[in-house]
Amino acid sequence: MNIERLFIDNFRNLKTQTIDFSNGLNVLCGKNAQGKTNTLEAIYLATIGRSPRTRKDSEMIAFFNPALTLESKLEFCHQDVKHSISFKIKGSQKQIFVDDFKLDKLSDVIGNFGSVYFDPNTIELIHGGPSNRRKFMDIINCQISKNYLKALQNFQHILEQRNALLKTDGDTKNQMQIWDDQVAKYGTYIYEARKTFCSKLLPVAKRIHKSLSQGEEFELDYISFLENENTEDCYKKSLKETYDKDKLLGYTSFGIQNDDFVVKINGKDARRTGSYGQIRTVALSLKLAEHELLKDEYGDFPVLLVDDILSSLDEDRRQKLVEYISQFQCILTCNEFLEDIPCQKFLVEDGVIEKL
Ligand SMILES: Nc1ncnc2c1ncn2[C@@H]1O[C@H](COP(=O)(O)OP(=O)(O)O)[C@@H](O)[C@H]1O
Ligand SMILES: [Mg+2]
């Protein structure tokens, strides 16, 4: 699938404009604070219904816009058919239109157009806490399966209810059963799906990582509280067993909300012993593996949105990465144009994106 055109109106510092992209590598170049990251954010927003940078949608509306409106509209081609997605904000209202039909639920936009976004913060996928890695697994699985999205929404909602009950005074043991059953049902489903996902991700990430890193060995292990006890009954039993502890803590200590995965490079935990460059390459390999796995779901490669990554890689790794991403539609930002690499160039200056 390829983005053909982006229309933006009142989006951060970007002027109201239409940008036509090419199918291969598109390079957005400009000085700091001109609107490069904002452009990628506008694209990502329309593909998944949320910003990669902020949870506060109002932050994206251009300053001094009294009407408090914003629009980001993508026109794209998928299997020779043209489609559009438009994300709009009007005051406190958010709306998404797919092919000009308004969606009932914002999350229904997921699955229409695939994009994979990475920026310097992607390193948190390895460096950061487990929630970064769970989010990575969840966002991909939500794109792969509507049932996963539903299970995750239900799980989060029910876990909140269970935690609220744990926080109330007095013994609530007898009222727990109903929540425990539901937590175990959806939790087991999520566990199974994440485990299957990791087993699919591993060989792909391993291959990509090998080519980006000159042959380092890559391994990935999914770590779950449910390890070797992957049935609903064991989940329920464990919730019962941890009730007293949970009541003291005021939250649910056992379950898939604590899951994680570990990446090893040449047999060693990358998070603990990897160099900065190695960790960055691992994070990139995971994102590029995501890109390849999503191809199977969409029937076509998603677009790659790559923000400000190149300057932090050495010449060799940079060259390998650019060769790799040039095979697909990619929108990449940088401070200097890349020499000797065929691409469509854009100059970004004061919120205006000019095709060169
Ligand atoms: N809601 C907003 N309205 C207007 N300008 C904004 C808004 N949010 C951020 N900006 C400005 O957008 C500018 C460009 O940001 P960005 O796209 O991150 O730059 P870069 O080209 O370095 O990637 C910054 O100067 C920032 O102050
Ligand atoms: Mg930027």
Image: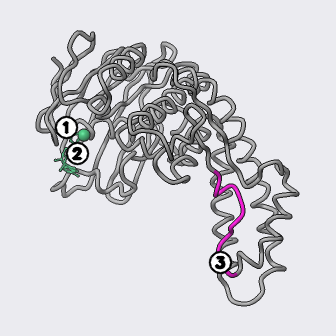
User: Could you tell whether 320 is left or right of 216 in the image?
Assistant: left
Q: Is 254 one of the magenta-colored residues?
A: yes
Name the N-terminal-most of marks 1 and 2. Answer: 2
Q: Name the residue carrying label 1.
A: 16
Q: Position of residue 180 (x, y in %)?
A: 79, 66
Q: In this view of the protein, can residue 290 be seen by the observer?
A: yes
Corner quadrant of residue 76: top left
Q: Which residues are magenta?
A: 248-259
Q: Is residue 186 above or below residue 295?
A: below
Q: Residues within 10 Å of mark 3 (few under 14, many from 20)?
A: few
Name the N-terminal-most of marks 2 and 3. Answer: 2
Q: Is 238 one of the magenta-colored residues?
A: no
Image quadrant where one finds the C terminus: top left
Q: Position of residue 202 (x, y in %)?
A: 63, 29
Amino acid at the residue labelled 2: Asn
Disc 1 is placed on an element classified as: loop
Disc 2 is placed on an element classified as: loop
User: Could you tell whether 140 is left or right of 47 in the image?
Assistant: right
Mark 3 CB in 8 Å range of ligand 1? no
Residue visible at 29% across and 55% down?
59
Disc 3 is placed on an element classified as: helix
Q: Residue furthest right?
A: 233
Q: Position of residue 99 (x, y in %)?
A: 45, 30
User: Could you tell whether 240 is left or right of 215 in the image?
Assistant: right
Along the line of sight, the residue nearer the viewer: 13 or 138: 138
Residue visible at 42% across and 17% down?
324
Q: Name the residue carrying label 2.
A: 10
Q: Name the residue carrying label 3.
A: 249
Residue visible at 64% across and 57% down?
258
